[in-house]
Amino acid sequence: MSEPKRPILYSHPFSSYCQKALIALYENGTEFDIRMLGPDDPDAYADLVARWPVKRFPMLMDGGHAVHEASIIIEYLQVHYPGPVRLIPGDTDAALEVRMLDRFFDNYISTPQQKLVFDALRPQDRRDPYGVEEARTMLDAAYGWLDARMVGREWAAGDSFTLADCAAAPFLFYADWSHPLGERFPQVTAYRSRLLARPSFARAVDEARPYRKYFPLGAPDQD
């Protein structure tokens, strides 16, 4: 009798959105295979683009079914590969809060952070100083809101580690590299440290270490 096929994650370890999905997989010890999006497996990217012309990753393949977007991958895993850590609460109102926070980290931490990175990758004469200033302003506003929210909380939605924390971990990790928290937001800094100590995210961070030299703003020595 042949062994059941495992889901396949098309991923790169240095990608924040891939790390988001990997955290969920590691939290529950889900068995999966990986297609590394890089020169060691040139066909992997071609396969991804053939199924997803917008060329974004991660992508999860489960049998012949493609699942796109890290948040949806995590929801899919909870439905089809449930484990001991429930990342989206069963309670409807609690689940709504978790999903709202997931969108917060995607839209108001990751998006402006990536604006800073993408701008640094542009030729000097094609850069967007106004857009960069807007991105930094957004990050400061998001840091401030989160700092007030995290008073008395261990995780973003309370006492339990959830989808929201899967998003927060890589996005705050790179955001602090791009627009440092400094000493202005002590609650966010402490929360970021707790995320880094979480074994699932610590594993993702370690797997990405060989690629730090490619960070265009310069990877700091901490973390």
Image (cartoon, rainbow, N blue to C red):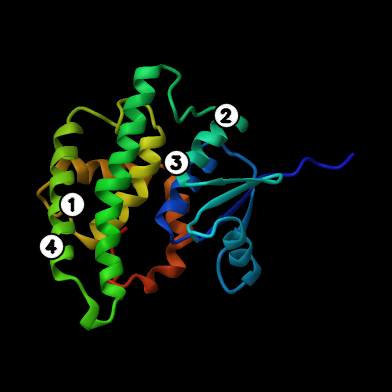
Whether residue 120 is situated above or below residue 124 in the rendered picture: above
The residue labelled by disc 2 is: 79
For label 2, the SS is helix
Q: Residue furthest left?
A: 184
Amino acid type of the residue tagged 1 in the rendering: Leu
* Residue 189 spot, x, y in % from top left: 21, 46
Between discs 4 and 2, the one toward the N terminus: 2
- Mark before the other along the chain sequence, 1 or 4: 4
Q: List the residue tagged with mark 4.
A: 133
Marks 1/3: CA–CA distance? 21 Å
- Residue at position x 55%, y 51% in the image: 59
Label 3 vs label 4: CA separation?
28 Å
Q: CA distance from mark 4 to mark 2?
A: 41 Å
**CB within 8 Å, label 4 to label 2:** no
Question: Mark 2 belongs to which amino acid?
Answer: Val
- Seen at 86% across and 42% down, the residue is 2
Residue 138: percent from left, percent from top: 16, 51
Query: Which label's residue is closer to the chain start, 3 or 4?
Result: 3
Name the quadrant of the N terminus: top right
| Identity, as a three-letter code, of the amino acid under mark 4 | Glu
For the residue labelled by badge 4, is the local secondary structure a helix, a strand or a loop? helix
Tell me how far mark 3 sits from mark 2, CA to CA: 13 Å
On the image, the x and y values in percent for residue 23 come to 47, 44
Residue with the mark numbered 1:
139
Q: Residue at x 35, y 21 (%)?
A: 94
Identified at 19% across, 71% down, the residue is 128
